[in-house]
Image (cartoon, helix red, strand yellow):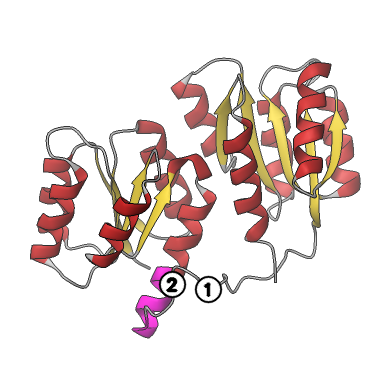
Amino acid sequence: MAELLIIDDDGIVRDALSVFLTRAGHRVLVAADGANGVLAFRNNMPDLVVLDRDLPVMRGSRVFESIRKLSDKTPIIMLSGHDDPEEVDSYLRRGAAAFLSKSGGLSPVLEMIARLLDAQSKRDFTGLNTEKPAEGPDAATAPGLVLFADDDPEVRAVLRRLLSSLACEPLEAEDGAAAIELARARRPAIVLLDISMPKRTGVEVLKELAPEMPGTGFMMISGNDDEEEARDCLRFGAFDYATKPINLAALGEIINARLSLQKP
């Protein structure tokens, strides 16, 4: 498989991408700042780079230029916390393979990596920013069906409205035990799990269901910003992690991106 370099000062992003890409069989190198990112690239010459735009020591733009001097062919995916259309266009004109917003979650990043590596093997990078992924839906899941589990009725009401606005079919549970029962009965495409729930916690539900439902995407929602908890959930099979209060716009983008992976 491929050798990939992740340059990002966000430990959760580095760990999450490392977990999923290693699980897919790739060798993953990481760097937490720009200077070490350039050094890691020079010493290893990886097949693909995921590069954060905002980095300590050396900014992403300088890292980008340094990598391009070492190799003008290695695909570079730029990540950013915000989207400036002019900046996006500038990076794409200078040879970036893609420019993705972190608000969209990890699914679009993983999707783009898979597409770039596939194109790299075919030596064809034409139209990578616009074409649909070639993966089909998982036959074991119900497309558009999203299960959310939270013991707070107000949170469930908010998520119900959000999912309806996204043309998803919402399915709700008020505790972990009910979430397990509904997930097994309906096989949703996505499961949103609150970390703290009665009967069974979100982590317990994740650990039980993820191995038996590989076609379902599990996303965790927590009332605290605990990085170690986030890493544990990602190791147990969650594809993303969000904290309360929920950013509904960002969550909607994450859900749509994940569902797009299952479209034919």
Q: Which residue is mark 2?
A: 128
Determine the residue positioned at 46% across, 65% down: 114
| 93 vs 31, nearest the viewer | 93
Mark 1: few, some, or many residues within 10 Å (few <14, many ≥20)?
few
Q: Count the labels in the image.
A: 2
Residue 170 seen in the figure = yes
Q: Which quarter of the picture shows residue 148?
A: top right
Q: Position of residue 165 (x, y in %)?
A: 77, 42
Task: Categorize mark 2 by other alpha carbons within 10 Å: few (<14), some (14-19), many (20+).
Answer: some
117 left or right, relative to 57: right
Q: Is residue 23 above or below residue 103?
A: below
Which x, y percent locates residue 138?
73, 63
Q: Is residue 35 magenta?
A: no
In the displayed structure image, the side of residue 251 where residue 81 appears, left or right? left
Name the quarter where the N terminus is drawn.
bottom left
- Pick whichever, 255 or 190, lies toward us: 255
Task: Give the x, y percent position of residue 222.
Answer: 61, 21
Residue type, mark 1 in image: Glu
Residue drawn 60% across the image and 36% down it? 249
Q: Position of residue 243 (x, y in %)?
A: 57, 23
Task: Name the residue: 42% across, 52% down.
Answer: 100
Prevailing SS of the magenta stretch: helix
Assign a secondary structure to mark 2. loop
**Residue for point 10% across, 49% down:** 39
Looking at this rendering, what residue extends furthest in the front direction?
86
Q: Are marks 1 and 2 in contact (CB under 8 Å)?
A: yes
Quarter the C terminus occupies: bottom right
- Write down the region rendered in magenta: 116-124
Q: Give me the disc on residue 191.
A: none
Residue type, label 2: Leu
What residue does disc 1 label? 131
- The residues tagged by marks 1 and 2 sit, at their Cα atoms, a distance apart of 6 Å
